[in-house]
Image (tube, rainbow, N blue to C red):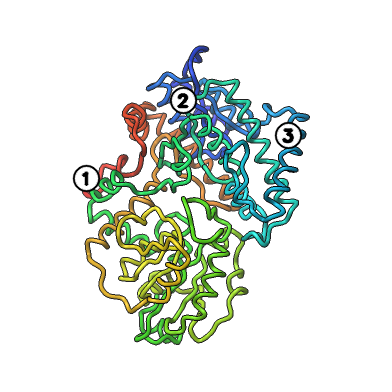
Amino acid sequence: MDKKKYLKVLKLLSKNRIEYHKDRPYILLDGVLDTSHNLFINVAIGLAVHEVYGYNVAFLTDNSRCFVNDIAASIGAEVININQYNPKKYSIRKIKYYWDRLKYRYVDKKDILQISIHDIPIGDLVYDSIIRFKKDTYTLAHFQPAFIKSTIADAIRRYHSFSIVLKDFDVKLLSLSHKFYVKFGIFSRVAINNKIPFISKSRAHLTLVNTLWEHRLNNYSIDHGIERKIRRIPESIADNYVKKRFLGEFKQNDVIFAYSSKKVYDTEMLLQRLSLIDSMPIAIVMLHAFSDAPHSDTSMLYRDYYEWFIETLHIIKRIEKIQWLIKPHPASSIFDEEGVVIKLIEETPNIKMVPPDVRTDSVLEIADAVITVRGTVGLECVLFDAQPILAGDAYYMNLGFTINCKTISEYKQALSTITKKSPIDESVKSLAKKVLYWRNESYLFFSGIFGPEMRPNLPKEELLKHELWNYQHVYDFLSENDYKSDVYYKKLIVFFSDKRKTLCVADLVDFEKVEQA
C-alpha cells in the first residue's frame, strides 16, 4: 500500500471524528504498542467509549512515531507522550531515592518480587522484564545488578510520569495491550491504585479489570459465565478446529512450531525410537519458554519457569518407576532459547529428551501424564487420555479435569503417583476442544476495522508486509462500508453499554453461519 492509500485510510477514519469537550473525562488508549492491529482496535474502543459515555479520547505513548499521531489526529483524539511528564531533575532525584531504598531492602537480598512503590507491587513486573529483555537471563540467579537497576529506574520513571498524567487529566478508563512487564504494567497498576478501571486487551479479547486480584488473573481465566458461553460452542466447530490445529494450519507461533514441518510417529515407532517400555507409566514435562512472563497469572509453585524446570528435574531423578520425557517449548527459538534445555539435563535411563522433529500430538499419544505450569498442552493432552498436572494457576484450572498442585509437597506427590492412563470421559474431551477453540479464536479474531496482530520476531520485510496488509485491509472495508456497521464495533457498544466484564470470540462469532460454511 502506498502513501496515498495510507492517507486515504486516515481520511476514511476521519468520517468518525469526535469533538473534544473541556468538561468531560478521558479514556486513555494504548499507543505504546504502535502496531497497526493495536492502534486500529484501540480506535474502535475509543470511538465506542465516546459514543456510549461521551468521554474524550487520548492515546498514551512513549515515542513520537507518526503512526500514533496520524491515527489519533484522524479521529480527533489527543496524544499524551509520557516522556513529556517527567521533568529530568525530578526524575533523577526520585530514581536515586527509590534505588537506594530498594537496593537496601530488596536487591541485596535477591527478593525482587517484593518490590513496591508507594504500596503498589511492581516486583513481578520488574522480574519478568529482566528475564524477557536481558539475553540468557532466565531466573533470579542470572540477574545482573546493572540491569536490575536500569529496570527499576524505568519503573520509577513510568510510575511518576503516569501519576502526573492522572493529575493533569480526568481519566476514567484505560485500555492497554499488555498488563505485564514494566513498559505496560506500571500504567495499569497505577490506574488500579487510583480506582481507575482498565481494559486488558489480548488481541481482540477484552477483560475489564477493577482490582489488583483481577489484574493478576490471566486474561482468559474461565469463570462460570465464560464456561457457559464456551459450552454453547457447537461440537462440529470445535472438532474442525482441533483437526486443523494438529495439522499446524493456524498462524500462531505455538501451533506452527509444534505441528508444522514435524514428523508424525505412530505409538510403536516412537516407543522404539525413545527406548520406552509401554507397560511402565510415561510422563512428559512440557516446558514453557523461560523468558515468557512467568507471573502472567495469580500464582505458581516456583519463582519462574526455569526454576520450576530445574526443581522438577531434581524431583523426577529420584522417581525411577516412571519414564520421563522432556520437551522444550515449541516456540523457544523466538525467545532465543534454542539449546538451553539440552545443556541442563543429563539423560538417564528414565529421563530422555523428545527429539525436535517429533510432532506434539505423536508425543501426547504415548503420554500417561503431562506436567506443565499452565500451558495450553494441559488441554491438548486430555484429548489423548493423559492426565494434566499443573504447577501453577492456569486459565482452565477450574474445569475439573486437572490436578492442581497448591504446594510443593502436593506437586511431589502428584509426580510420584503417576500411573498408566485410563479413558477420559468424552464430555471432558468435548469441553477441552471447545476451550482450545475459544482461546485460539479469541486470540486470532479480526474484523473489517482492524487486521490480525503480527507474530513476534518477524524479519523486517515480513513485518512491513504484514503492516501494509493491515492498512490495505482496513482501507478496503471502509471504502465499501460504514465504520459502525462492523461486527466488532457493534459488540463494543454492547460491551460498554451493558458494562460487561469480557468480550470474547463467543460473543463475536455467529456459530450458525460458521457451521453452514
Circle 1: residue type: Glu
Label 1 crowd (10 A; few <14 / some 14-19 / many >=20): few
x and y percentages locating residue 325 in the rendered image:
47, 76
Real-space Cα separation, disc 3 to disc 2, in angstroms: 45 Å
Mark nearer the N terminus (1 vs 2):
2
x and y percentages locating residue 203 in the rendered image:
45, 43
What residue does disc 3 label? 94
- The circle on residue 12 is 2
What residue does disc 1 label? 512
Dot 1 lies on which element?
Answer: helix
Residue drawn at x 75%, y 51% is 146
x and y percentages locating residue 60 in the rendered image:
57, 30
Residue drawn at x 36%, y 32% is 492
Q: Nearer the viewer, residue 297 or 74?
A: 297
437 to 499, vertically: above or below: below
Q: Residue 423 vs residue 475: left or right?
A: left
Real-space Cα separation, disc 3 to disc 1, in angstroms: 58 Å
Q: Nearer the viewer, residue 411 or 182?
A: 411
